[in-house]
Image (cartoon, coloured by chain):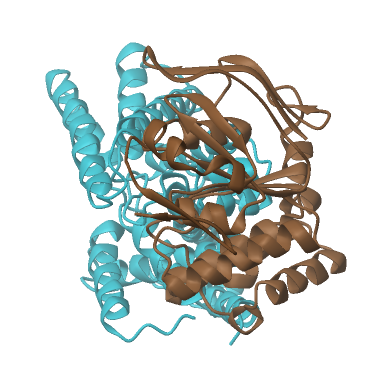
Amino acid sequence: MIRIENLSYAIEGKEILRDITLDVPRSGFTALIGPNGAGKSTFLSLIARLEPLQTGSIHIDDLQIGQCSDRDLAQRLSILPQVPDQPPRLAVRELVGFGRYPYNRGRPTSDDGAKVDHALSVLGITDLAQRSLDTLSGGQRQRAQIAMIFAQDADYVLLDEPLNNLDLAGTRTLLVILRNLAEQHGKTVVMVVHDINIASRYADRIIAMKEGRIVRQGAPDEVIDKALLHDVFATDAMVLSSDFGQVVLV
Amino acid sequence: MTTRHTFWAGLIGLTLLSFLSLFIGVIDVSPRDLISDQETFELLVISRFPRTAATLICGSTLAIAGAIMQMLVRNRFVEPMTAGTGQGAALGVLIVTLTMPSASIFTKMTVASLVALASSLGFLAIIRKMPPTQPLLVPLVGLIYGGLIGAAVTFVAYQADLLQYIGVWMNGEFSGVLQGRYELLWIAAGVGALTYLAADQFAIVGLGRATSINLGLNYSQVVLIGLIAFSVVSALTVTTVGMIPFVGLVVPNIVSRLAGDNLRRTLPLVALMGAGLTLICDILGRILRYPFEIPVGTVFGVVGAALFLWLLYRRPQHG
């Protein structure tokens, strides 16, 4: 479980997060939604210890952010970073191999090799293993990054808007993979996403943020309604109920 | 051909080149004289061997320094000798020369390393604020930053009537290398070799701060280690033979294009190619206008630029 207590965060005097207390239960696929500037990305980067905490505390099971060792945490929690503008000239297999770094500190064993192969096959990029990242499309690169996270084999996987720059097919493939991570592999997946419909369709749980606070949380059916769109997103859009969940007509 | 094969083939080539380098110079020396003539043997020990060793060490360590800096800064167009580190080292030597004229060479080297490190930190602090969408700003700012420090060095030296001195540090060449005057470079060789232990860390840092932290790396610590490594290498080069530009820029770029960015695999190649190209340029500099010499930096500028253009315009093969 990710346990967040009294978390506040300010940048140059401007409050980004205001006294957030929240439990994200183990396993399942959680979507973090909210309008621009709600503090979603900051929230995620604090959980992933990319920025130092100011007030409040975050626990990943028994590990406390800021207190535990970086290496222990890297085996427990991973974050998918934004894909760099200028991709490195690394073979896909080399990048995915770095996912094992928290375990082997650069001295890979045959077990690590097997885990890397497994990650490549789960992400369906075995045939790209020897290709250099700078020769791949955006979607393929994104999958290579996720294969690295998969090889890292942490219980908690955080993703900050992983769907940017992906086309329809790429988006769907990635979402199916993430669902699969949560369902088949028992991972706890937390994703910041802009598209409410994607959150509604794929997530088990939605957390809605506004102005640095958590305003709603729960199953998609409970959270997504006209009131949410009006209060949180400040827009009047229609919500349709379908067999596949709530659909927002943008 | 795999990276490993390329490396061994290159190493053999480099050994042959080094042997050749021992027998090229104003005084004619042939391997046969070596056994019969005591003077020839002394010439070799006092001048030719030190010169060849210094060239190999400077070439390989400057190339390594460039590769590491490019990873830390995440920009392929920078190198310590043009982005303020080399100029900082020159400033350090100048400060020691002015304030403690009788200081030992070791003191000189230490101060040069510290000022070089401070300059590198300054560069990092400046470019941190730059938009990542404008990668070409970084080398441009580096050139200006290095130019400013270089100008300060020249100004102070002019005021203190030390212009001739700084000419030695600002334009590197190997003709002055003699036994007893280059040995500090072996420290640079040691530092260069040690960086291989952190090759994985540098490669991960090259993927960005978020990826590094995600993989449990102590990001700031690795960056600091890298900074110290390339600052010390630059400072030692500047204090012993002077500034040699382009090696740190051209060599890592060529290797990256041919063999990728996984430093664990490519760093030996970077060192080898740095040593080889620098030695070739020094040999060319010795024979082109025989018996006069062309400074290695000048030759390298021409050869390196030609090689680089060829790489840019041929079809990409990697991947």
Picture colour for chain B: cyan
Residue B151 image offset from top left, x and y in percent? 16, 31
Residue B15 image offset from top left, x and y in percent? 57, 74
How many marks the image carries: the answer is 0
Q: Is residue B83 visible?
A: yes
A166 left or right of B287 in image = right
Is B169 above or below relative to B255? Answer: above
- Which residue occupies 38% across, 45% down? B241
Q: State the residue in front, A209 or B125.
A: A209
A14 left or right of A82 in image = left
Is B235 above or below relative to B293? Answer: above
Report the chain shown in brown. Answer: A
Is B106 above or below relative to B141? Answer: above
Q: State the residue in front, A227 or B146.
A: A227
- Which residue occupies 49% across, 67% down? A171
- Which residue occupies 33% across, 20% down? B97
Which part of the image, by quadrant, shows the N terminus of chain A? Answer: top right
Is B287 above or below relative to B170? Answer: below
Q: Is residue B20 visible?
A: no
Which part of the image, by quadrant, shows the C terminus of chain A? Answer: bottom left
Q: Identify the image quadrant of residue A145.
A: bottom right
- Which residue occupies 49% across, 60% down? B56
Q: Identify the image quadrant of residue B159.
A: top left
Residue A203 image offset from top left, x and y in percent? 62, 52
